[in-house]
Amino acid sequence: MGNVQIITDSTADIPESLTQELDIHVVPLKVHFGDETYEDGIDLDSAQFYQKLADSAVMPTTSQPTPYQFEEVYRGIHRTNPDSPLISIHLSANLSGTFQSAHLASQTIGDEIPITVIDSKRASYAIGLIVVEVAKLAKQGASLEVCQSRIDELLKDTTVLFMVDTMEYLQKNGRIGKASALVGSLLKIKPILSLNDDGEVFPFEKARGNKKAIQRIVNEFHERYGDDPVHVGISHAQAESTANELMERLKSEFNVSKSVIADIGPVIGTHVGPGALSISFARSGNQ
């Protein structure tokens, strides 16, 4: 049997250097500015997106790949790797129809190609962290069972906490979930948000200002992970200096075995807006 092949979608916000290094297949979602349509990360990168967002009079929208697009990706991988099982890990089904499209495609061709489709119940590099950890195992030749076992661990262990400069984007794009109670009450308040066990946005806590919010997030990760070796990911929307400073702090306070700083791409950026910052933690595997 060939190495397990790992597929994800562009909302995982994995840096291209990592997708190439670990042979991760990425299926793009789409961003729409009025009549203009772009493929996330293909013909619209993060810098171009945020500039367009600032210049545009219309709020962008997003759409998931069709089942047929996933089917074509799966068939293409299978032609090149006919003996390899496929694992396809995607954006929370409570935030997008991407998982459903992938699932429908797998049902159509499941008799021909062994595919496992997984709802990560997460977004941005909180998905990417899971994908990268499993892709490392797959590239080392780990079996399907070992890869699936590691995914099960990561689905239980990966924590994401994030902040947005405004709730406007989450609200207007219908992804606000259980955080709707915060709308209109954010004067001098920085909301800390997370994704619950169903993969839906919910308010974790409120803090007064960025510094106190970041300190609360750091404290929470200390409580959850202590001195365990951790894979840490920070994804940001035009907040690179803050992300770099925070990562240096996390490296000094935690046992960081792997660290990744990633841009929040066009699709997730459509829903969180400029200035968003997301921090993801999981215990590192024995790799």
Image (cartoon, grey):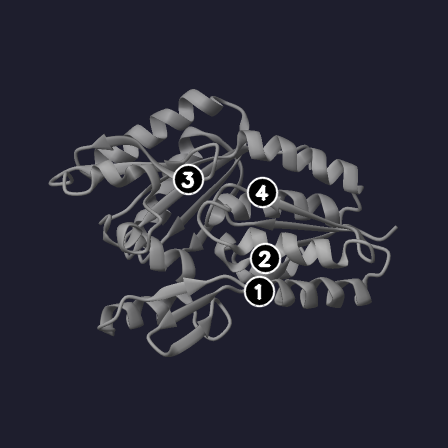
> What's the distance in space between the residues labelled 3 and 4, CA to CA?
18 Å
Q: Which residue lies furthest to the bottom in this view?
A: 35
Can you see residue 260? no
Q: Quadrant of the C terminus?
A: top right
Which corner quadrant of the image does residue 66 belong to? bottom right
| Residue found at x 46% / y 50% | 124
> What's the distance in space between the residues labelled 4 and 2, CA to CA?
20 Å
Any mark on residue 200, and which?
3
Provide the residue designation for mark 1.
66
Mark 2: few/some/many CA within 10 Å (<14, 14-19, 20+): some
Residue type for callout 4? Ile
> What's the distance in space between the residues labelled 2 and 3, CA to CA?
19 Å
Mark 4: few/some/many CA within 10 Å (<14, 14-19, 20+): many
- The picture places residue 85, in percent across and down from the top left corner, at 79, 51
Q: 86 or 161: which is nearer to us?
A: 86
Which of marks 4 and 1 precedes in the sequence?
1
Provide the residue designation for mark 4.
130
In the image, residue 287 sits, relative to residue 73, either above or below, namely above
Residue type for callout 2? Ser
- The picture places residue 53, in percent across and down from the top left corner, at 28, 68
| Residue found at x 51% / y 54% | 97
